[in-house]
Amino acid sequence: MISILHTADWQIGRVFAQFEADDAAALFEARFAAVERLASIATDRGVDAVLVAGDVFDAQTVAEKTIRRLFNAMQGFTGTWVLIPGNHDAALAESVWSRARRLGAIPSNVIVCVEPEPVVVAGKFTLLPAPLTQRHTYADLTEWFATHVPSDDLPRVGLAHGSVQGVLSADVDSANPIAAGRAQSAGLAYLGLGDWHGTKQVDGKTWYAGTPESDRFKANESGQALLVTIEAAALEPVVTAVPTGKFSWRQLEQHMAVDSDVDEVVRALDAVGSSDVLHVRVSGTCNLAGHRKLTASLGVARAKARAVLWNAEALRLEPTEEDIQSLHADGFVGEALRDLREQQAGAEPELARDALLALARILDDQVPGKGTGA
């Protein structure tokens, strides 16, 4: 029996520039912690090897410290690790992998496959790797799996990084293609893939593991690794998803039209926890009273969640007569509020909305017990 932990798309060194500095730092660190959890799982389950299907690093230019920290994070599993380069860390003539070798950072139990050559792993199976040697290729690098003549009778396992044709969405089906049915045509016991950041079964012997720590707002079963048990090459392997991620990335889109729409967003913000990374996009219209509620809830949520991204570019503020009266915006000031409300339909809606909000905030601060918030 063969036992494998299949993972991919670690994206070590990724910079989360869209987040505030402290949140970005926490998300950066979480990727190292995910590797440590993988090492712990591999040890606890007693697997024969951990296979990493590309994009170990997010870029060729990651810092030397980042390279060393990655291999330090792998120390919890002393068995065999097999890594292949993906499109983010392709095995170029000068690459993150050549830098790692010069640094002497790669431990003896880590095999980095930079050439398409078979490797016997743990004396139990022959690994056929398809490393990327450039960021984009338009040839199927797994084609040699089907033509390779084995020199032993060990089960064969493939490891590749790319897009299985006709399976993934059209926007990722162009570069780094992999033929559908490759596991069957090459007589593989299992084909472990990377590039798609969620867990996905392609066929009985072909799986995408996904990234072990979520990094985008897609409901694609990310934050996992795959425990693969192979009883015999002719049989389908038993594949079990194992949770590995710390943070849950969620997205909420809400079009505002009535007060209950505001309440829906407030409920979502109130429900966040410390492991949530939330992206909220609101559009439509909202009065000033509703905006106060949103702002207050957003402030609380940002302190509770790991990160909250807030996008209100498509939200139009519509102060009601009650809003204006509550602000004591009589005469010229009241007319200014009304004018700004109308200007949101013009050429610079965001500028008009921000000006309206700023004026409302100034007025609100002058009314005891009120405040629109930041």
Image (cartoon, rainbow, N blue to C red):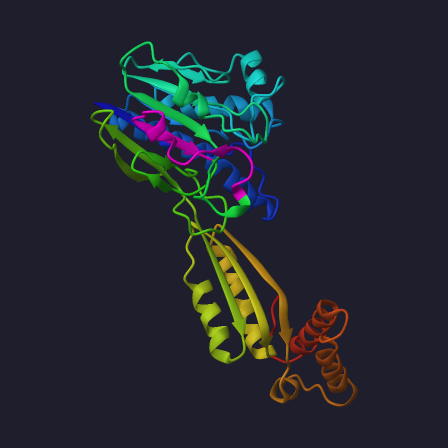
| Image position of 7 (left or right of 48) | right
Left or right of 6: which side holds 116?
right
Residue at left 38%, top 14%? Answer: 119
Out of 74 and 6, give the one closest to the viewer: 6
In this view, the residue in front, 111 or 29, is 111
Write the residue at 45% across / 25% down: 143
Image position of 342 (left or right of 241): right
Look at the picture and state if 8 lies above or below 355: above
Instruction: Inspect the magenta stretch and tell me whether residue 320 lies in it.
Output: no
Q: Which residues are magenta?
A: 172-194
Q: Give the quarter of the figure containing the C terminus.
A: bottom right
Image height check: is 119 above or below 348?
above
Residue 19 position (above or below residue 78): below
Q: Is residue 85 visible?
A: yes
In percent of width and height, residue 53 lies at 43, 29
Residue 335 on image: x %, y %: 76, 86
Q: Position of residue 321 (x, y in %)?
A: 64, 89
Residue 161 placed where, x, y %?
47, 31
Q: Is residue 190 magenta?
A: yes
In the current view of this chain or complex, which residue is farthest to the top?
A: 151
| Quadrant of the frame with the N terminus | top left
Residue drawn at (29%, 12%) of the image? 123
Asked whether residue 7 is in view, the answer is no
- Is 297 situated above or below 139? below
